[in-house]
Image (spheres, grey):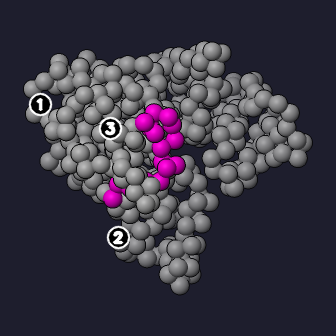
Amino acid sequence: MSALEVEALLRARFGLETSLLGSATVDAVLKRRAAEAGLAAPAYAATLGESRAALQTFVEAVAVHETWFLRDGGPFEFLVTEAAGWRRTHWADALRLRILCLACATGEEAWSLAMALREAGLGAHDFVIEAFDLSETALDKARTGVYAARAFRSPLAERWRDRWCEPVTDGFRIRDELRHSVRFEQANLLDPRWVEGLTPAHIICCRNVLIYFGQEARSRMLGRLAALLAEDGVLFTGHAEAILMSGNFRCVGPLNAFAFSHRPVDPPTIPTPVVVAKIPTSTRESPPPVMQSPVSSGPVSPSDELAEARVLADTGHYREALLQVDRVLTRERTNARAWLLKGLAETALGDSREAGMSLGRVLYLDPTNEVALLAMARLETLAGHAERARLLRERAARAVAETAQ
């Protein structure tokens, strides 16, 4: 089995789009795992198609598990201010509120939800959080509930840590009074069997998950989320995923909460994937200069590869610029400037699908990047998605206003 066949297997079984994870990442894991098994890379790759256990171990090594407490604090602050009111009005008949935390990784997000609900005034028996992840290794850490100080990266997270954790030798341990409210289970979110027996949830947290899925997997997952969310429930997404919600859902609460509820219309349907329309031929033939707005401020050394790529793009050499940017991304997968330049060059070439994915990565890494927000809004406009474009322009305006304060 070749590396390309391994990537196809990850896409088919788990919905992972390896171009978003980075093919270099998949290749590096493949070589490392092969060496650990004492096999040549092709021989090890062949075992992935034959052994479910080997494939599970491999995908756990490839999947992204980066997270921390109260990551992007808006959703949790919104819960603190609103959850008690929801409990008294919309959900008063529920014996216990049901919360789903999907792709919970090592548990920080699930525990953050529990802390937020308790901070909102809910009692220990007012809710239960069911947290799912693909990786058993990550779930073992989540169940242990012990985290280093760096997992609490904001003043609010530190305050909540002092209330809901206790110091131990290795860091901080989740207090027992939170533990019985959270359950951790292993699940492949694309496998329909994990939803069997689940009743609609009052709150669903599915953040920074869909950005790693291919279009088909995204559509399936969006339909599943619509079915899992209670009629008056609230769904929280990540920054880069909010634009996917305009089909079935409507925004509720402040923009930085990225919270959604069902539209009060017909039953939800699976929305069209994010960017599918091609840029018109006239735009392809006479593409505008890529860098209409600066990627970064201040002078850049002429030897900087991104500066060279920018010069190539500004002079219309988009494919050469992409080759340069891809070399940077091979070494630095979290370089937001590189992803932005890549997305803008792909837009100029008319490759709207790849441009949407690249710009989505920028918004994952830098949620308030005005250039990426406006570029994505333009793609959505060309695709005929006026509501998504409007939401993106609103986010861009808010980002500018907050920067000016």
SS class of the residue under badge 3?
helix
The reply to whether the C-beta atoms of the residues labelled 1 and 3 are less than 8 Å apart is: no
| Residue type, mark 2 in image | Arg
Residue to which mark 1 is pinned: 94
Label 2, residues with CA under 10 Å away: few <14, some 14-19, many ≥20: few
Tell me the residue at 50%/34% (across/down).
155
Measure the alpha-carbon separation of dots 1 and 2: 39 Å
Tell which tag, 3 or 2, sits nearer the viewer.
3
Find residue 52 and name its label: 2
**Element type at mark 2:** helix
User: Magenta segment: does it hold 82?
Assistant: no
Mark earlier in primary sequence (1, 2): 2
Image point (70%, 38%), residue name: 337
**Looking at the figure, which quarter contains the C terminus?**
top right
Closer to the camera in the image, 36 or 23: 36
Whether 203 is drawn above or below 387: the answer is below
Mark 3 Cα within 10 Å, few/some/many (few <14, many 20+)? many
Disc 3 marks which amino acid? Met
C-alpha separation, residue under disc 1 versus residue under disc 3:
20 Å
